[in-house]
Image (cartoon, rainbow, N blue to C red):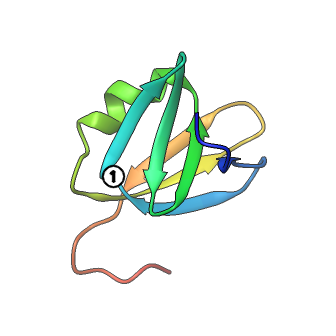
């Protein structure tokens, strides 16, 4: 697994294109440029369906949530 594996902290949000999602050593890893972000394995199948779309991933105190950003709209 990549030595530069990043884990979101509670209430941290990441806006990413859903391009590459892998399951490595039982963990879901989203690759974003040179950064690899660790996510729960249960998100892998959902994120695979969103390839090519821009999404935000939010880590809460108890889980991870994500939403698809609409094309043509600026983020707030």
- Report the residue at 45% width, 50% height from top: 31
- Compared across the picture, whether 18 is left or right of 60 comes to left
Horizontal side of residue 33 vs 50, given as left or right: right
40 relative to 18 in the view: left or right: right
Q: Which residue is mark 1?
A: 18
Q: Examine the image and state in which quarter residue 62 appears.
A: top right
Residue at 77% across / 49% down in the picture?
A: 9
Q: Residue 66: image x %, image y %?
A: 47, 46
Q: Is residue 23 above or below residue 36?
A: above
Of 64 and 3, the residue lying toward us: 3
At x 39%, y 32%, the residue is 22
* Residue farthest toward the top in the current orientation of the protein: 26
Residue 70: percent from left, percent from top: 27, 67
Tell me the residue at 56%/57% (across/down): 35
Q: Is residue 11 above or below residue 30?
A: below
Quadrant where the N terminus is found in the figure: top right
């Amino acid at each position: 697994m990549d030595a530069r594996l990043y884990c979101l902290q509670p209430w941290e949000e990441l806006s990413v294109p859903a391009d590459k999602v892998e399951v490595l050593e039982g963990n879901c890893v989203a690759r974003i440029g040179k950064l690899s972000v660790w996510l729960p394995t249960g998100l892998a199948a959902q994120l695979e369906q969103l390839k090519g779309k821009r999404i935000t991933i939010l880590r809460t105190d108890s889980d991870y949530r994500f939403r698809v950003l609409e094309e043509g709209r600026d983020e707030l």
